[in-house]
Amino acid sequence: MIRFYNTLSGKTEEFKPLRPGQVGLYTCGPTVYDYPHIGNYRAYIFEDILKRFLIFSGFKMTHVMNITDVDDKTIKGANVLGLSLNDYTKKYIEAFFEDLKVLRILPADYYPRATEHIEDMVRMVRGLLDKGYAYLKDGSVYFSLIRFPDYGKLSKINKEELKAGARVESDEYEKESVYDFVLWKKARPGEPCWETELGPGRPGWHIECSAMSTRYLGPTFDIHCGGIDNIFPHHENEIAQSEAYYGQKFVNYWLHCHHLVVDGEKMSKSKGNFYTLRDLLARKIDPVDLRYFLLSTHYRKMLNFTFDNLEQAKASRQRIIDFVYVLQHQPLPETSQTESASALVASALSNFQDSLADDLNISAALAALFEFIREINSRLARNELSRQAADQVLTAIYQMDKVLAVLPEKKEEELPAEILKKIEQREQARREKNFALADSIRQELLQQGIVLEDTREGVRWKKIN
Ligand code: AMP
Ligand code: ZN
């Protein structure tokens, strides 16, 4: 059974998708006014783990991530540089897709852009006006909170703060401003605008996600994600707009990740306490170490960014990589006296899966992985692991890595079987203390361009020219 903590109910609930075996997932994408910072990537990597885990568990995913390419911030940025909105956002959209690849985030099925879905937004705003949930004021359209009694059910906002008829224009605002929010902003000099049946103007940020999510996933879908800063007002407003328009439940499970913080403060552009992925790459940081760092703390816990913490994550990841390397390269007996590794492999995999099924408990999942590594290492040290068992272990580790995606991608070039056999013969000779034979095999291999290195974990090989 898979369970997730649902922000909507405030409880951990069994996950039951609307259609068996299929999941519709919407994740709020980037506002492309600048390069994302690594706090944003905490959210996208949490969503990637969620998605990879559901795929691992046998679900077929339809994942939609929007690109917010028109809002207050993109318009401001484009105006400062005197560029069109498209010319301004293009560079950041491209950079975002590059980052996703580098961080091994699986691509979404759809990346709808707000500027390409204006008609869908206009249709919704028109419908909200017709149904009496929205009103026109000085050329802009606002959502009337008083008309939607369910307002606040996600963020548990104090509705006493609600000031009837007070309006908020900007896309982002704090909890103190529980006001009628803008759906459609009338055209202003120097701002891009669309000629529509609502009059000339442009959409507010919140209606964009309501229109694009339901366009691709239907009026009701399974999971909607974002960082906790999205809960109010963005997701609260999405619920209001969508449920008022369609007259049915918008989303069954709302999952939100906590923030990446620096000295206790949310990493954000406005505070200036941020690093972009590019900043870290310039410091020669391996992006997959960053991925490991961002995924290895439970998504609902705050995560503190320091270079020390990043180093620790790198060391943990290296332990997995070294283990895989040894299993791949250490010559091992074809058979072993002891029981097969099947039971260990099965329990490691089920512990890993059960942990993630418990609201993505990554700490327990990684503990299961490292416990498995310890057990296999001790069998190795006692020379109780056969080649066949090692291969089984490797298959299990690569299966877990389908969720984690932290192992090196390029598989090492494999050695031909006769060379592997020679390495094993040399090991045998060493065990029998026949050092003359062991040395002559080492020389023979050297002439074929294979250098052997005896390490604590066993023999390693390297190819030389
Ligand atoms: P934005 O481009 O600001 O709309 O943010 C994109 C995503 O990143 C949203 O899901 C935000 O909730 C999330 N986000 C922003 N800052 C952080 C942070 N410091 N830690 C985790 N997630 C964040
Ligand atoms: Zn959104």
Image (cartoon, rainbow, N blue to C red):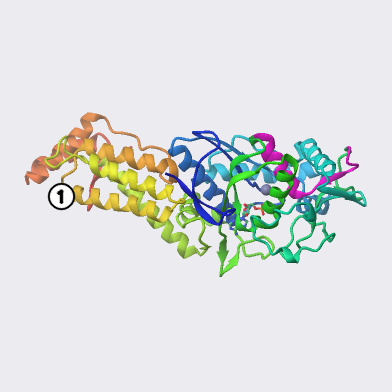
**Residue at the image position 80 percent from the left and 63 percent from the top:** 163
Would you place residue 303 above or below residue 461 in this image?
Answer: below
Res. 278 visible in picture? no
| Left or right: residue 267 compared with residue 173 | left
Would you place residue 441 above or below residue 32 in this image?
Answer: above
The picture places residue 278, in percent across and down from the top left corner, at 59, 52
For residue 212: magenta? yes
* Along the line of sight, the residue nearer the viewer: 433 or 122: 122
* Along the line of sight, the residue nearer the viewer: 111 or 269: 111
**Residue at the image position 64 percent from the left and 47 percent from the top:** 28
| Left or right: residue 422 compared with residue 74 | left
Callout 1: SS: loop
Res. 127 visible in picture? yes
* Along the line of sight, the residue nearer the viewer: 168 or 412: 168
Q: Main secondary structure of the magenta part?
A: helix
In terms of image quadrants, where is residue 113? top right
Which three-letter amino acid code belongs to the residue tagged 1? Arg
**Residue at the image position 64 percent from the left and 39 percent from the top:** 220
**Is ligand 1 within 8 Å of the beta carbon of the residue shown at mark 1?**
no
For residue 226: magenta? no
Q: Which residue is mark 1?
A: 382
The picture places residue 149, in percent across and down from the top left corner, at 73, 54
The magenta segment: 197-216
